[in-house]
Amino acid sequence: MEYYQPEIETASREELDKIQNERLRKIVKYVYDRVPLYRERMDEAGVKPEDVHGTEDLYKLPFTQKQDLRDTYPFGMFAVPMEDVERLHASSGTTGKQIVVGYTKNDLDTWGSMVARQLVAAGLTKKDKVHVAYGYGLFTGGLGIHEGARRLGCTSIPVSSGNTARQLAIMQDFGSDALACTPSYAMYLGESAQKAGIDTSKLPLRAGIFGAEPWTEEMRKSIEKSLNIKAYDIYGLTEIMGPGVAYECSAQKGMHVNEDHFIIEILDPETHKPVPDGQKGEIVFTCLTKEAFPLIRFRTKDIGTITHEKCSCGRTFVRMSKPMGRTDDMLIIRGVNVFPSQIETVLLQMEQSPNYQIIVDRQGVLDTLEVQVELTEEKFSDTVADISKFEKELTEKLKSLLGIAAKVTLVDPGTIARSEGKAKRVIDRRKLI
Ligand code: DLL
């Protein structure tokens, strides 16, 4: 069995506990001294850094969530001055504004080795060429995998996302050994390869490093067949580290969480108390080593389970399940996080009726997003030319805010069903879980 850092990936529970306890004490003091939000929250809760001796005291610490990042936008929760920040990344927040995170040089080094662990767990070595088709840019996927491939000594092929014909040509001509992208894009690449008559069994490609969105075992099988590879799941989120938080090994029975850098808790979303292994709850992470942007007890809103059972691969890190849903309304469409409230923001900016409905579907292997917007009586009486101008403007605004294209369908006033309780804004016809 190959590991990237065997001494830590197979460390005993006692050693891991010791590392976590020491690092937790240090990071709690670090954030208390450097980030006003933590100092205020901890003072309010009557907790001092010295009250936290180890993971058994985690429950004393206040939670953080996406809203905190929005409230302190852009850099209010950074723990180092900007001169020590080597890179910024961002992702969408619940309304128009992005949330921003930062990495110091050491953070980028750690990130690289965590992703390198994933690549080794997927059977890669420095001899391999890693085709990175996650988006490069503020999204953590592209540059995160890139950092890991670099760290392991692989040859990176930084293709970024899009332009499927070119992706396939590169895969054939350069001989990519591994493909890293969202599972839905991998499905699309597989389907396109078949359509183009490419015999994937003749390609060197043998592993896929897929994550950033929910995907099923059926999708895994279908990708493995069409691309003739073994597909591995990886999990991460912008706020914590992007890809590099948890990864599958050859056993493929859950994702190992990099416990020397993160503590995972599974909490009952109502009581906030830990649930036993195997029971569903909200996934909460604490960063143990990050310098620029260490989050303590960050509520991911992802629902999942963990197990401490021994894994046949020899790794001792706890394993988390695939996320089984979310406690909020975040949708992931073609790998992009979309909140219904972002759409509402655009409509309100354009002084439109707040009656809308979002329809997410899957055509072939691609997610589709349609926004049905009810015209106001006033707009309805406009000329056809005016209405079509409005439709165009709305389409453009949505695209620029969401980062993906949505089909806008304007409907007559009063036609979107009114609800007596919570409005049902989203109809998701994809079968993902
Ligand atoms: O998606 C980071 C990432 C990039 C992970 C590349 C893996 C590979 P965000 O855009 O902030 O970050 O989205 C994070 O995506 O809270 C989950 O809901 C979802 N997610 C991420 N990985 C998986 C996965 C990146 N393997 C949000 N399975 C998370 C299911 C996933 N959902």
Image: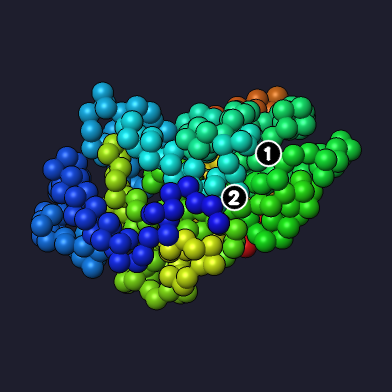
- The quarter in which the N terminus is drawn is bottom right
Image spot of residue 188 (x, y percent): 74, 42
Q: Is residue 364 above or below residue 131?
A: below
Q: Residue at x 61, y 52 (%)?
A: 232
Q: How is the image coloured?
A: rainbow
How many tags in the picture? 2
Which residue position holds label 2? Answer: 122
Question: Position of 75 compared to 209: left or right?
Answer: left
Q: Residue at x 34, y 50 (%)?
A: 261
Which residue position holds label 1? Answer: 177
Question: Position of 387 compared to 312: left or right?
Answer: right
Q: Label 1 is placed on what type of residue?
A: Asp
Separation of marks 2 and 1 at Cα, in angstroms: 11 Å
Residue 22: image quadrant is bottom left
Q: In the depicted view, which residue is nearer to us: 157 or 211?
A: 157
Residue 91: image quadrant is top left
Ligand 1 within 8 angstroms of badge 1 C-beta: no
Q: Residue at x 77, y 31 (%)?
A: 172
Element under label 1? loop
